[in-house]
Amino acid sequence: MDDVDLTTLDPMRMFILSTDTLRGTKTDQTIPPNSHWSDTPPQFPRFGTRGRELHILKLLCRVDSIPPSLRCATWVTSTVRVARTLTSTSTVSPHNHNSNQQPLSEVEEFGTLKKVRILEYGWETVRKTMFSDVSDEETAIANYADLHFGLGKVALEIMMLDDCTPQHAPVPLSIGRNSGNARGREGSGGVNVTSKDGGIASFARVLYAIRHVVGMEYCPLLPQLAFLLLTVMPEAYAYTTLRELCKSSLYFLPTSRVDHVATTRTFAVLLKSRYPETYAVMEACGALTPQSLGVLFQRFMVTLLRWDDVLRLMDLYTVEGIKIIHRLGVTLCAFCHAHLPTSRYILNDGTTTPQSFWEGVRFVARSDVFRFGVLVEKSYGTAALIMPPPVRWIRRNATFPRREYIQRLNDDHSAWAVRYIEDGLFEEGASNVTNTIADPMDNRVPATTSKPVGLVRTTSDYPAVLLRNAHERSLIASWLPPSFQSTVKLDLIYSTDCDGRSVRSFYDHCCHSKHTLTVLEVLVNPDTNTPAAAVDSNNGSGKM
C-alpha cells in the first residue's frame, strides 16, 4: 500500500479489519508493503477503475492470497458484487456483463466502517425477530447441530470438533518436489478454540437466521461456509455474506437434494473428460458417489487441504462461486493420484475404498510436494495470469468449461439425480476424512423440533410467565399448521397475576380478540390437596 496523507483520510472510508469471531484467535492486521491491495476504496488503486473490478479480483486471488486483515471486507464485497450483478442480469455468470455491475462505491461500502452500524443494526433486528426471549436463544444454541441443512447432525458435530483442532503438519514425501510459489505456508495448521462457547453461540445464531429468516432448508455446503466466514468476520457480516450467497444459489451453492446430487455427477463427467485415468481409479473404488464427494461439495476440502490453503480457496470461491470447486477439485484429484504411492490407498487385500483414496489425497495435499500455487497454475494452464504491469504476463494454455456449460450439465443430470434419490441410494451426511467412524444412521436427517412461536416482549409490570420458556412455545408451534409456525406471535392480553381471577375480568380482556390461546397451570393447595389454576391468555397476533 502506498503512503497517504493522513490529514486527508476519511476514517469512515477505511475497510473493516478481519476478526476471528468463532475461535477468538489473533489476526495479522498488516498489509504487506508494495501490495496490490489497499485499506481504502478502491481495492486495487494500481489498476484503476475501468469497470472490470471483478475480473481483476479473480486474477489477484489466483496470484496470491488476500491479506488476512482484508479478508472480511473483501469476502463480503465480493459476494455482494456478484449477487447484485446477477440479480440485475438474470444470468449465471456476472463476468460477461461488466456494464451491469453495481457502482463501485455502493459495493465497496459494505466493507468499510461507514456500513458497520447499518449492518449491526440489521443483525440486531434479525436477532430480536428470531429470539423473543433469552430461552429461545439458549435453546437454539444448545441444539445447533439440528441446523445441519442436510450435512447430517453427527457430521456437523464432527466438523466443529475437527475444524477447531490443529491439523496435521506437512508430511515429508520422498517423491521429489515441484517448483512453485511457497507463500502462505506459514502456520499450516488450524488453531485451538479459545472461546468455544462464544464461537458455537455465534455459529448457531447465524445458521438459525439463515434457516428461519432467509428460509434456506437444504444446503449441505452452508454450515462449512458459515464456519469459514466466522473465522474472519463478526456475526453481522457473516449473516450478510451468507444471505447474498443464498440469493445467488445457482452461482454459489446447490440448495436442494437434486441439485446437490446433479452437481456431484457433473464433477465426475468433468473429471472423466480431463483426466480419464484418475476417473477410472475413483469410479472403481466408489469415490465418485455423491456421498464420497461430500469432502468437496459439503466440507469444502477442509478435511483435505491445509488451513492456509482452505482460506485461499475461500478467497477464490467468493468471486468464482462453485465453479472453483469443480476446477480445483478435478485438478487436485489428478495431481494427488499422480504423486501418490499405490501403497497409500490400496489395501492389503488389493482393493481400494473411498475412505482410503481420500486419505491418500489428504496425505499428498498436506505434504511438502504440494503447493496451492502449483494447483492453481495447473488448473488454469501455465499460470492463468493476464494482468497489466507490474504483474507478469503469462499466456493461458488450458481451458475449462464455461459456467453456462457446467450449468447445462447440471440440468441434464437432474433426471438422473431424481432417480438416484428415489431409489434410496443417497444418504444424508458428508463423507468425512477423519479417524472417527460415525454410525451411518445418525447421519440421516433427524426429525427436528418446531421453531418456538414468537412472543411479543412484555414489560416487567406485565410479564408472561407460563410461556416464557422456549420449550413450551415449541410444543405450541408443533400444534399449528406449518404456514402459521413462523408468522404467529403471542401477545399477552390477560394474566391472573395482574388482572385478577374473576370470570368477568377474563372476558373483558379477551372478548375483542379473534384468536386466543388460554394456558393453564395446575397448582395443588398443600393444605386442602385440591387443584387451583393459574391462567395466561395469549393473543395470536400473527396472520391467522
Image: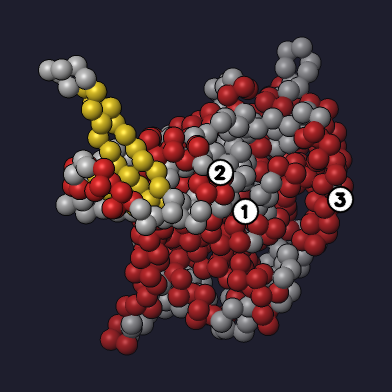
Q: Tell me which numbered mark, 3 or 2, is placed earlier along the sequence.
A: 3
Q: Badge 1 is on which residue?
A: 373
Give the vertical position of 62 relative to 256 (above or below).
below
- Image coloring type: secondary structure
Question: Disc 2 designates what residue?
Answer: 481
Secondary element at tag 2: loop
**Camera-side mark, 2 or 1:** 2
Q: Amino acid at mark 2?
A: Pro
Q: Which of the marked residues, 1 or 3, is nearer the chain's N terminus? A: 1
Image point (44%, 69%), residue name: 111
Give how far apart the Cα atoms at labels 1 and 3 are: 33 Å
Quick check: can you spot residue 248?
Answer: yes
**Callout 3 secondary element:** helix
Residue at the location (79% across, 26% down)?
A: 285
Q: Amino acid at mark 3?
A: Asp
Vertical position of residue 471 compared to residue 12: above or below: above
Q: Which residue is mark 3?
A: 412
